[in-house]
Image (spheres, grey):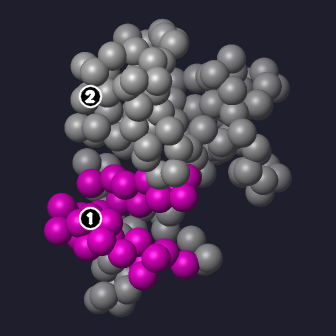
């Protein structure tokens, strides 16, 4: 679609503590099939503000950008332009553990890279896993695998 369409309260999904509204059941089902594909970076918080000030500042749909298929929201034009001038600096501000698997870290004491196709959002951070089994272990008890050192 790539355009903003007002959601209908009859078609909602709560994911990672946020409620998303969709214009219809078809869009709702698309989201449910692969939420990580549609959730904005950092759950809608500004990645530029995170990197530059280590602050969680809510973004706005009025200052949005799509980079490599991901949606980024910014509180103003200044942050949006900073991102567009240097997306590599800001694009992965929400990638926990540098993309390594938190389950591997806890259960095997190893740093193993995750894969984008096994991505989960938890508390506005993006966690990646090498396979569906590790992803599912995480989903059963995220608190076991997440620490303040992410």
Q: Which mark is residue 135?
A: 1
In this view, the mark in front (2 or 1):
2
**In which quadrant of the rendered view does residue 57 lie?**
top right
Look at the image and tell me whether residue 68 can be seen.
no
* Quadrant assignment for the C terminus: bottom right
Q: Who's the residue at 43% across and 46% down the image?
A: 15
Residue 109 pos. (x, y %) = 35, 90
Q: Nearer the viewer, residue 132 or 26?
A: 26
Position of 26 with respect to 105 (left or right) is left
Q: Nearer the viewer, residue 101 or 21?
A: 21
Q: Which residue is disc 2 drawn over?
A: 30
Q: CA distance from mark 2 to mark 1?
A: 20 Å
**In which quadrant of the rendered view does residue 149 lie?**
bottom right
How many residues crowd around disc 2 within 10 Å: few (fewer than 14), some, or many (20 or more)? few
96 w.r.t. 21: above or below: below
46 w.r.t. 98: above or below: above
**In which quadrant of the rendered view does residue 65 lie?**
top right
Q: Nearer the viewer, residue 7 or 47?
A: 7
Residue 47 magenta:
no
Does label 2 or label 1 sit earlier along the sequence? Answer: 2
Q: Who's the residue at 39% across and 37% down the image?
A: 13
Residue 145 pos. (x, y %) = 42, 78
Residue 140 magenta:
yes
Residue 16 pos. (x, y %) = 47, 52
Bounds of the magenta span?
A: 118-147
92 w.r.t. 110: above or below: above
């Amino acid at each position: 679609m790539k355009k903003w369409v007002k959601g209908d309260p009859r078609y909602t999904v709560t994911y990672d503590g946020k409620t998303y509204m969709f214009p219809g059941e078809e869009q709702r089902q698309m989201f449910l099939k692969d939420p990580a594909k549609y959730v904005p970076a950092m759950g809608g918080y500004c990645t530029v503000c995170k990197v530059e000030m280590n602050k969680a500042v809510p973004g706005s749909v009025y200052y949005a950008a799509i980079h490599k298929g991901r949606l980024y929201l910014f509180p103003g034009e200044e942050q949006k332009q900073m991102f567009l001038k240097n997306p590599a600096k800001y694009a992965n501000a929400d990638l926990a553990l540098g993309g390594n698997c938190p389950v591997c870290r806890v259960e095997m004491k190893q740093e193993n890279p995750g894969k984008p196709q096994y991505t989960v959002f938890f508390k506005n951070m993006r966690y990646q896993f090498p396979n569906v089994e590790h992803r599912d272990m995480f989903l059963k008890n995220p608190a076991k695998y997440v620490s303040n050192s992410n």
